[in-house]
Image (cartoon, rainbow, N blue to C red):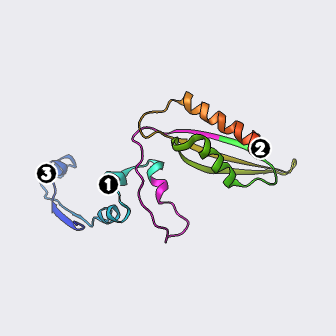
Amino acid sequence: MEILGCGIMEQDILNGAGANEKIGWAFGIGLERLAMTLYGIPDVRLFWSTDSGFLSQFKVNDIETSIQYKEISKYPQCTNDISFWVPKEYHPNDFFDLARSIGGEIIEQVHKIDEFFHPKHKKQSYTYRIIYRHMERTLSQKEVNEIHKKIEEAAVKNLNVTIR
């Protein structure tokens, strides 16, 4: 496995930088190659990604957690938020389970992004961001909104929340 590399830079790169009369050397440690092997990442270009579907796979609470890369879709994400007031017996895991049971495989991520306690009304509110994406096609915002509406309705019915 190549982890160390060096060589002479292309003259076109130096010319473009205004260093026409210079010779340049490139050097690399290749840590990405080690990470590719360690996590099963198939393409080095994924390390340049800002896609949350890729990056979220490496956010763990315990550094000892085993990580294995899961393929992400090449199609764009659709993002919808949902906010609601919760009853006293509410547990956040219930919403995660409910959202995934309705949205299935097209729900890529569910994150709690905000919580608020209203001091006057003594009510707790949570806001979740749901990221939808299909592995084989682009989702329309209309079809995502339909699934999102079903999640809202099920949350009201099954979790006794009040949509804000």
Residue type beneath disc 2: Val
Task: Please name the residue that numbered disc 3 is placed on.
Answer: 11
CA distance for labels 1 and 3: 30 Å
**Rendered-image quadrant of the N terminus:** bottom left
Q: Magenta segment: does it hold 76?
A: yes
Few, some or many residues within 10 Å of mark 3 (<14, 14–19, 20+): some
* Residue bounds of the magenta highlight: 55-81
The residue sitting at 41% across, 37% down in the picture is 136
Viewer-nearest residue: 71 or 19? 71
Cα distance between the residues tagged 2 and 1: 42 Å
Position of residue 56 measured from the top left corner of the image (x, y, whole percent): 49, 54
Identify the residue position indicated by label 1 in the image.
42
At 35% from the left and 57% from the top, the residue drawn is 41
* First-in-chain label (2 vs 3): 3
Q: Are marks 2 and 1 in contact (CB under 8 Å)?
A: no
Residue type, numbered disc 1: Pro
Residue lying furthest top: 142
* Residue 83 in the figure: left or right of residue 16: right
Disc 1 or 3, which lies upstream in sequence? 3
What x and y, as percent, mark residue 33? 29, 63
The foreground one among 68 and 121 is 68
75 within the magenta span: yes
Asked which quadrant contains residue 27, the reply is: bottom left
Horizontal side of residue 18 vs 116, given as left or right: left
- Alpha-carbon neighbours of circle 1 within 10 Å: few (<14), some, or many (≥20)? few
Residue highlighted by disc 2:
161
In the image: residue 47, left or right of residue 108: left
